Image (cartoon, helix red, strand yellow):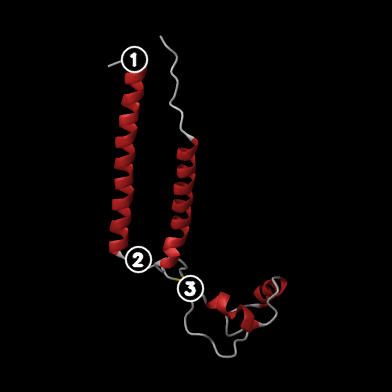
Amino acid sequence: MARYVAPVQGKVGQIIDVIVLLIMAIGALYIPLWLGLAGSAKTPQPIENPTWETLGQNPAMVEQWQKLGYADPASAAELITARFDYSFSIGALVVMIVVIVGYYAILLRFSEKEYRDVIAEKFGE
């Protein structure tokens, strides 16, 4: 039985692969920002002249804020009052499900084709 030798990819193909992967990675990180889907922290109504008491902080919490470099309650007010928005849209959920299932189907189809090619190359039809 002959030893299997995998096909060799050329330098141009490797460069194109790297560029495509780089574009996909940057796109996966940038597109949610561009569409406004990232950054779930929302600040409710700002508090006028905040104090540690109006922000609901006890002395132990104030001490920890000061250790972090927030001596003034106004500088920490935005962090303390930020609340997370857990809402989502059904449309976005459906799109995500379709993308994941579609990716899985394409992956299975290409894997099956390549698997059959390798078996045919190694063992014949």
Q: In which quarter of the image is residue 92?
A: bottom left
Q: Amino acid type of disc 2?
A: Phe
User: Could one spot residue 89 in this view of the protein?
Assistant: yes
Which percent across, then down, holds residue 57? 61, 78
Q: Name the residue under label 3.
A: 83
Point 30% across, 47% down: residue = 101
Q: Name the residue under label 1.
A: 123
Which percent across, then down, holds residue 67? 72, 71
- Marked residue nearer the N-terminal end (2 or 1): 2
- Marked residue nearer the N-terminal end (3 or 2): 3
Image check: 14 left or right of 102?
right
Total marks drawn?
3
- Mark 1 closeness class: few <14, some 14–19, many ≥20 residues within 10 Å: few
Which percent across, then down, holds residue 1? 40, 9
Q: In this view, does 49 lie above or below 58?
A: below
Q: Amino acid type of disc 3?
A: Arg
User: Could one spot residue 52 in this view of the protein?
Assistant: no
Q: What element carries label 3?
A: strand
Q: Amino acid type of disc 1?
A: Phe
Which percent across, then down, holds residue 83? 48, 73
Q: Mark 2 points at which residue?
A: 88
Q: Nearer the viewer, residue 39 or 87?
A: 39
Point 29% across, 36% down: residue = 109
